[in-house]
Amino acid sequence: MPLSRIDAAGMLQQLMIESSPLIEEYTRELCPVCTDVCCRQKHGIYRERDILYLNALGTAIPARDPARPLDGPCEAIGERGCAHPRWLRPFKCTWYFCDPLLEAMNDGPQKKARALSRAMKDMIECYDKLKG
Ligand code: SF4
Ligand code: SF4
C-alpha cells in the first residue's frame, strides 16, 4: 500500500531527528570555521514540499521576512547555528552537503559515512512521497 503523506511526513521527521546528531558530528567541526557559510536567506525558504510536510505534521510554517536580501544571512541563523531543530528546517538545509562536508565523510570512518548515506537515502525517499 502506498505511504500516505501523513505517514511519509512522520517518517521523515523521525529520520531527521535520529540522524541530526550524526550530521552534527561533521558540521560542528566544519561550520564554525567556514569562510563561506551556506545559510543564506534564499536557502531557508520553505518550498512547496516543505509546506506539505509541515502541514501533514500539523505544524505551523516558521514565519519568514520577505524584505530580507535573499543573498544575505538566513534570518534563522544565530550565534550557535540554526535556531530551528533540523526537522523544522526546509529539507534543503539537510540534504545539501558542501564539498568540505563530503570530503570529511570520504576521509573519516566509513561506517559512520555509510550510516549517514543510508539515512539520507531514506529521507529523500520520504520527501519524494510527500508529492501530491
Ligand atoms: S555546511 Fe559547509 S558551507 Fe555550510 S556552513 Fe557548514 S562548512 Fe560551511
Ligand atoms: S539551516 Fe537554518 S539558518 Fe541555515 S539556511 Fe536552513 S533555516 Fe536558515
Image (cartoon, helix red, strand yellow):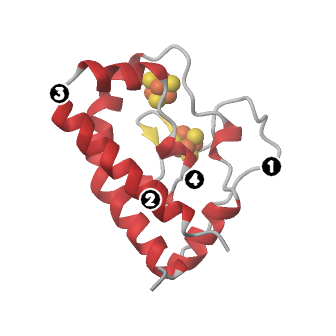
Query: How many residues crowd mark 3 within 10 Å: few (<14), some (14–19), many (20+)?
Result: few
| 92 to the left or right of 117 | right
Tell me the quadrant of the picture where the C terminus can be found.
bottom right
Disc 1 to disc 4: CB gap under 8 Å:
no
Residue type at mark 3 is Pro
| 69 to the left or right of 75 | right
Question: Would you name the residue on which mark 3 appears?
Answer: 109
Which of the pair 60/127 is nearer the observer?
A: 127
Query: How many residues crowd mark 2 within 10 Å: few (<14), some (14–19), many (20+)?
Result: many
Ligand 2 has an atom within 8 Å of the beta carbon of the residue at disc 4:
yes
Distance, label 1 to label 4, CA atoms, is 16 Å
Ligand 2 has an atom within 8 Å of the beta carbon of the residue at disc 2:
no
Which callout, 4 or 3, points at the residue further toward the start of the chain?
4
Residue type at mark 2 is Trp
Distance, label 4 to label 2, CA atoms, is 8 Å
Query: How many residues crowd mark 4 within 10 Å: few (<14), some (14–19), many (20+)?
Result: many
Question: Would you name the residue on which mark 1 appears?
Answer: 66
Question: Would you name the residue on which mark 2 appears?
Answer: 87
| 41 to the left or right of 4 | right
Question: Would you name the residue on which mark 4 appears?
Answer: 90
| 125 to the left or right of 28 | right
Disc 4 to disc 2: CB gap under 8 Å:
no
Which callout, 1 or 3, points at the residue further toward the start of the chain?
1
Which of the pair 63/3 is nearer the observer?
A: 3
Q: Which is more foreground, mark 2 or mark 3?
A: 3
Q: Which is more foreground, mark 1 or mark 4?
A: 4
Which callout, 1 or 4, points at the residue further toward the start of the chain?
1
State which quadrant residue 80 falls in: top left
Identify the residue shown where x is 54% and y is 69%. 129
